[in-house]
Amino acid sequence: MNRAEDRAEPPAEPDQTFPRTCRLTLSRQFRDVFAEPRRRSGAGFLVLYRENQLEHPRLGLAIAKKCARRAVDRARLKRIVRESFRLNRSRLGGWDIVVLCASGAPAMPNQRLFATLARAWDTIEKQPCVES
């Protein structure tokens, strides 16, 4: 009874994963968001977003060394954004989202950064996908 299937972890819920299809991976995808973004800023982050003509959101990160000098700080900020996005992905609809670091973010506690992102996700969720 020691089969591999018995030891394997159960699969994560579909909306709790962060597959490659939910990431901005090409420079032109980032360029499109930077060209005409809607904005939401808060303590620690600036969130730019734009409709993507897909059924699901995609996330891109632009955490600059200018904002967070130490690599460990940049990695922490990225982990926080990815985790928050992963948990809220199912309610965001068809948006391309780029998150940038704001000054002072590395010194902020995780709870405050998560709260900032939660407010941004709330704003994006309430936006109509098609401009009138």
Image (cartoon, rainbow, N blue to C red):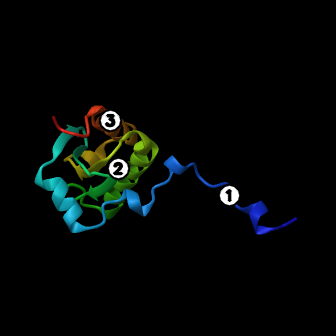
Determine the CA span between mark 3 and mark 2.
Answer: 11 Å
Which badge, 3 or 2, is on the more N-terminal residue? 2
Say which amino acid is labelled 3.
Glu
Which residue is pictured at 31% across the width and 33% down the height?
Answer: 119
Residue under numbered circle 1: 9
Q: Which residue is mark 3?
A: 125
Q: Is residue 59 left or right of residue 9?
A: left
The reply to whether the C-beta atoms of the residues labelled 1 and 3 are less than 8 Å apart is no
Image x and y of residue 110, in percent = 39, 42
Q: Is residue 43 visible?
A: yes
Q: CA distance from mark 1 to mark 2?
A: 27 Å
| Pointer 3 with pointer 2, Cβ within 8 A | no
Residue 117: % across, % down: 33, 40
Task: Give the number of the disc on residue 21.
Answer: none
Question: Image check: 88 left or right of 71?
Answer: right
Quarter the N terminus occupies: bottom right
What's the amino acid at mark 1?
Answer: Glu
Q: Earlier in the sequence, mark 1 or mark 2?
A: 1
